[in-house]
Structure formats: structure tokens, C-alpha cells
Image (cartoon, rainbow, N blue to C red):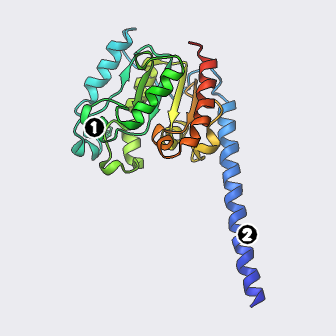
Amino acid sequence: MAELFLLSSNSQLQEELLSVVKAIKGYVLNQESLAVGLEWGKKSPLSPPIENLTGNKEVELEKVYQEMKTCHLCPLGKTRRNLVFGAGNPSARIVFVGEAPGADEDEQGLPFVGRAGQLLTKIIEAMGLKRKDVYICNILKCRPPGNRNPLPNEIGLCEPFLKKQLQIISPQVICALGTFAAQTLLKTDIPITMLRGRFHSYEGIKLMPTYHPAYLLRNPSAKKLVWEDVQMIIREVPV
Ligand code: SF4
């Protein structure tokens, strides 16, 4: 009996050790990918340049919008009320990227206009900026029913539109809001708690992951950590 208990403890221990090793391996690989080939200011060779860039970012963003405004690539095209492309300054130095539109955003066709959006506005204003100074968008452009989490196939189909937006705007800093935005952009499954608090690199652009404003509404004590993160952004992009 004692042996059986010992056996099960050992296998449990082995499983735990394996998951720790996997987590460390993922973390190290992520660090290596940041160090190798993704230095600040260098565009990833994986990013094909957008053709026919006019040099006018507003015009280029409008082209992307026109290309996708009736998108039905994934099933969310059927259930959305409005596609939420993104809003703000096409030449913004800071771009905030969230997860997906919620009910209010779906209703109005604008990003971050609900309660979480109002909190994001407060954060932006506390940074000494206005919403019109930055650009705000999401990984997914259409609302997942019932605000469920985005599915991998939806992310895979929608992400190219975001890539084009970011390539056109070419900001100095991207602030990824929440787990999905951070993990999707950084191609990692490292939890947001470990990702936040330091800059990463997305296609040569500095990326700061932080908590989603909706999370802050449920966990106000995390506001302090978000403030620390956005202060690092302010230092990087003085207003
Ligand atoms: S979520 Fe993205 S890929 Fe899916 S229908 Fe909307 S715009 Fe198209």
C-alpha cells in the first residue's frame, strides 16, 4: 500500500516536474526569440511588406477596412452586428490591442466603448494623452457570442488584418491588453502574470503586455501593476 502510494506520489512528482520543465523551456525559448533576430527597430523577415503603400496611413488603413468590412472568413461574421475595425490616430505612437469586441462595441462598431473602455480612457488620460492620440483595436474584429473566449481558428483567420493595421501605423509601442492579446501577438502560452512588467518585441516593435481593463474592473488591486506598466510606456514614448 505504502509502495503504491509512493508510486503514485512519484508519478505525480514526475508530472509536476515535467510541467515545470515545459514552462521553463517555453520561457527560455521566448527569451531567445526576443534576443535573436528581433532586435529593436528591425522588422521581422516574416512580415511581408504591404504593397502599394501610399505613405498616407489614413488611406492605407481605409483600404484594409474596405477589404475586410464584409468579412465572413470565420463564423463570427454571421453573428456580429457591426465589425469593429479600430479607431484613433493612424500615426499613433502607441497602439492598444485588446481581445475582441464586447456587446457595446458590437452595437456601436467602435472599440472599447463599454465599461472596460471607459477605464481604458482613464488610463490613457492618466498617461497624459487623449484617445485621439492613440490607436485602439482588437485581435478579433467581430464579437464572439456571449463574450466567450476567441477560438484559435478565429484568431488565425483574423490576425492578418491586425498585422496589416500595425504595419501601416508602425507605432513605437504596442500595449497588449490581457492574456489573449499578449499571447497571440507574442506567440506564447506564458501567462500574462509572467509576461507583464517588461517590454517584449513584436515584429521589431516594443510590446508591453498588461492586464485587460475588464480584469481591472473585477480586480481593482491590479490597477497598481497596470500603472507600473504604462509608466514604462510613458518613459519609452514621452508625451
Ligand atoms: S472575426 Fe475577423 S475573420 Fe472572423 S469574420 Fe470577423 S473580421 Fe472576419
- Along the line of sight, the residue nearer the viewer: 24 or 137: 137
Nearer-the-camera pick, 122 or 27: 122
Q: CA distance from mark 2 to mark 1?
A: 47 Å
Q: Earlier in the sequence, mark 2 or mark 1?
A: 2
Answer with left or right where residue 26 lies relative to residue 136: right
Q: Position of residue 127 (x, y in %)?
A: 54, 21
Q: Which mark is residue 106?
A: 1
- For label 2, the residue is 13
- Disc 2 + disc 1, Cβ < 8 Å: no
Q: Where residue 155 appears, x then y in whole percent?
A: 40, 42
SS category of the residue bearing label 2: helix
Amino acid type, residue under disc 2 in the picture: Leu
Q: Residue at x 40, y 47 (%)?
A: 150
Residue depth check, mark 2 versus mark 1: number of the one nearer the observer? 1
- Quadrant of image for the C terminus: top right
Q: Nearer the viewer, residue 239 or 17?
A: 239
Q: Secondary structure at mark 1?
A: helix
Q: Residue at x 31, y 32 (%)?
A: 84
Q: Mark yes or no: residue 104 visible.
A: yes
At label 1, the amino acid type is: Asp
Q: Using residue 127 as the reference point, say whether residue 151 is left or right of it.
A: left
- Residue 13, compared with residue 8, is above or below; it is above
